[in-house]
Amino acid sequence: MNTLLDTGLAVRGLRKSYGGREVLKGVDLTVAPGELVALLGANGSGKSTALRCVVGLAEADAGEIRVAGTSLRGLSGAELTRARRAAAMVFQQIHLVRRRSALDNVCAGGIAGLPLSRSLSPVLFPRELREHAMACLDRVGLADRAHDRAGSLSGGQQQRVAVARALCQGARVLLADEPVSALDPAAATQVMALLAELAHEDGLAVAVVLHQPELARLHADRLIGLIDGEIRLSTPAALLSEEDIAALYRGERG
Amino acid sequence: MTAQRTRPGLSVPRRNRKPFYLGVVVVVCLLGAAHVLAGRATDFSPGALVDGWHGMADFLAEAFPPKLDWDKVVQPALEACLVTLAIGLLGTTLSVPGALLLAVLGMRGRNPVVYQVSRSIMSFLRAVPDVVFALIFVTAVGLGPFAGVLALICHNMGVMGKLWSEAMEEIDSGPADALRVAGAREAQVIANAVLPAVVPSLVGLLLYRFDVNVRASLVLGLVGAGGIGFLINQSIKLFQFDVLATYILLVLVLIIAVDLLSALVRRRLND
């Protein structure tokens, strides 16, 4: 329908229930390439679930998901995995293998297409993959820490390694589930600036679940607000008002 | 600040729960009865121990001083200790591939049929004592250390597989999820997310099993698998209690050495 969306993310009518409770009540979400969209909302409003449905960590009950121009509807097995590979995910808990080096962790993002004989241990990873991973590490500004153990890096550095891993996956759509909730303010700003750069300079479609409206206003292009599984707010970041923010989080108090 | 702002004299709400004293009394009575029955079943009688004290005294008098004849006692015993150690080492190492396979297949949350089959195999291997395995293998390869090694491999595969699969289930599933999202296949996820995270605890459990297996190979020696256990059995049959005392001292040294070594390596791993 829209050539702009051929490399972005488009979600239509997404529904999901857990044990009878509707978490997503028909969510429409579009993220264009080159755009950073922040998802705001109280705990339990469905922000994370929406992202998890896109990458397959949760199974949507209804709705259509298009990743980089390919609809996931009707796909299964290897085809579904391949289509989903265009979307990468970054987590609040970072989820790196702490005992492995930063570079090996980044390489792991790109092993999906490799035969088992080249992917069961870092010593078997092909040189092209290692070079690609090095470029990704360089993109997040950590080329000099390539051989450091992931666990020895600071929280902000670890999250940037996780972003590099997502880049190594070759994703066109980058999803981030509260990527800065566990980081100090300086590191949080750095990671958010990196995500904005990846959208604006590298043309990725970036969707970030955030709990800090201030960070969203600073770094995002567009804000989407969810209340009880429905989108109630969609506004350019510059136009976000204090009343909007209060309305989003009102349900949690009382 | 909070001191002034708390409401004074707030009564503690009653918990809506029946008193449980009766339950405690019943449990204590049942446990008491079980112990009385167990005492009867095992002919537990402190009187018999007191009456027969001189039997032990005679034994100890004969055992001390230990016989420290180098050529006839100490040197053969040291060689036998090395055989015991070797049985424990091979029995542990050679069970690693099988244990790893059973552990990975026996992890919860994958194919339920594979899970049940793998759990059943491990339960069977654990349920059959290593001594019984040894007796079975003796019929194939004859008396000697080799039968002991084979027995330990079988039994240890079951025990270590179970310990390992539990260790793998306990780790954080986050890194594995991250690789699944990246499109990695299950074998790639295990090799690149699960195994690297659990290797320290797997090696710790491996060393613990080596420790246990060296002691087990001692018992296997008693039923004919060679090593220091075999010599101990002989010395008892020949009533050479002073020689027996020497063997037991050497076993003590061997066990302490293995224990210290594995503790040292485990501490290094956890850093």
Image: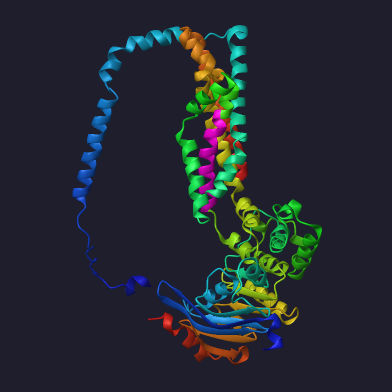
* Residue visible at 27% across and 26% down in the picture: B41
Magenta run includes residue A72:
no
* Residue visible at 59% across and 44% down in the picture: B100
Quarter that holds the C terminus of chain A: bottom left
Q: Position of residue B262 (x, y in %)?
A: 58, 35
What is the magenta range?
Answer: B151-170
Note whether residue B65 is visible.
Answer: no
Q: Position of residue A39 (x, y in %)?
A: 56, 81
Q: Position of residue A25 (x, y in %)?
A: 47, 82
* Residue visible at 55% across and 44% down in the picture: B102
Judge whether A140 appears above or below A35 on screen.
Answer: above
Magenta run includes residue B168:
yes
Magenta-highlighted stretch: main secondary structure?
helix
Using the image as rendered, state which of residue B12 and residue B202 is in the foreground.
B202
Q: Decide if residue B193 is on the left or right side of residue B208.
A: right
Judge whether B264 appears above or below B146 on screen.
Answer: below
Quarter that holds the N terminus of chain A: bottom right
